[in-house]
Amino acid sequence: MTPARAVWLSITVLFATQAHCGPLAVPRAVRELVPPPQRCHDKGEFFSVDGHRWAIVVNRSVSADAFTATRLQAELLQSLRLNLTIVDLAKSPIPQVGYLAFGDPAVSPALGQLAAQRNLGAKLARLSGQPEGYVLDTAATGVLGLGSTGSAVFFASVTAAQLINATANPGPGKHDTYRTPAVTITDWPDVGMRGY
């Protein structure tokens, strides 16, 4: 890669981050996401994710969602030693607090109810026609990743893992608690094939 090309790519990435999320308007963890999300809203607060009270929640009868949960569980265990259990949404309700829930709200009514409680309906409606588009909403009660396809749900989980990994800075004596920003991210690919 030529130096001119490297500079052009750096400027493009910086501009994309500024255009979509604002360089200083969101926490550092969001600015460091790769690729940068299309839209994000910073709620101005942080919350803690820990391995003792948090769980990954999916409908395991949807094979793509089951794969996403297993991959996210392995990623967080390997990178942070954060050991989260997987809860099957078809057999158990979503916990009141401490969940990383992923899936299609049209397939799992409990996710649709959570989306309505968090006022995500308009954001989800804007993603119609975007098979890899997703909404990721993080809050102290839990993380909610929604999409209409398996790949959209997978990309929501990748972003969630990046957010938690980017804030992996546990305090003294806290080996498995991570301060994570409360944000709402709406993302979809600019082109038909995702690339990094």
Image: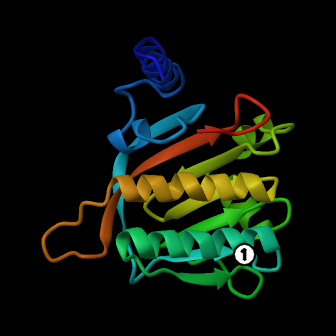
Q: Is residue 2 above or below residue 49?
A: above
What is the crowding at mark 1: few (fewer than 14 residues within 10 Å), some, or many (at least 20)? many
Q: How many marks?
A: 1
Give coordinates of residue 6: x percent, y percent: 44, 20
Give coordinates of residue 108: x percent, y percent: 80, 68
Residue at disc 1, secondary structure: helix
Give coordinates of residue 14: x percent, y percent: 43, 22
Q: Amino acid at mark 1?
A: Ala
Q: Is residue 150 above or below residue 14?
A: below
Give coordinates of residue 77: x percent, y percent: 44, 76
* Residue found at the very far front of the displayed protein: 2
- Residue 119 appearing in the image: no
- Residue 155 appearing in the image: yes
Identify the image quadrant of the C terminus.
top right
* Residue visible at 40% across and 16% down in the picture: 3
In the visual, does 76 lie left or right of 101? left
* Residue found at the very far top of the displayed protein: 4
Where on the picture, by quarter, is residue 158?
A: bottom right
* Residue visible at 54% across and 25% down in the picture: 20
> Could you say which is closer to the camera, residue 39 or residue 76?
76
Q: Is residue 148 above or below residue 12?
A: below
In the visual, does 24 lie left or right of 11? left
In the visual, does 71 lie left or right of 153? left
* Residue visible at 74% across and 88% down in the picture: 91
* Residue found at the very far bottom of the displayed protein: 91
Q: Which color scheme does this rendered protein use?
A: rainbow
Residue of label 1: 66
Where on the picture, by quarter, is residue 150?
A: bottom right
Where on the picture, by quarter, is residue 59?
A: bottom right
In the visual, does 91 lie left or right of 117? right
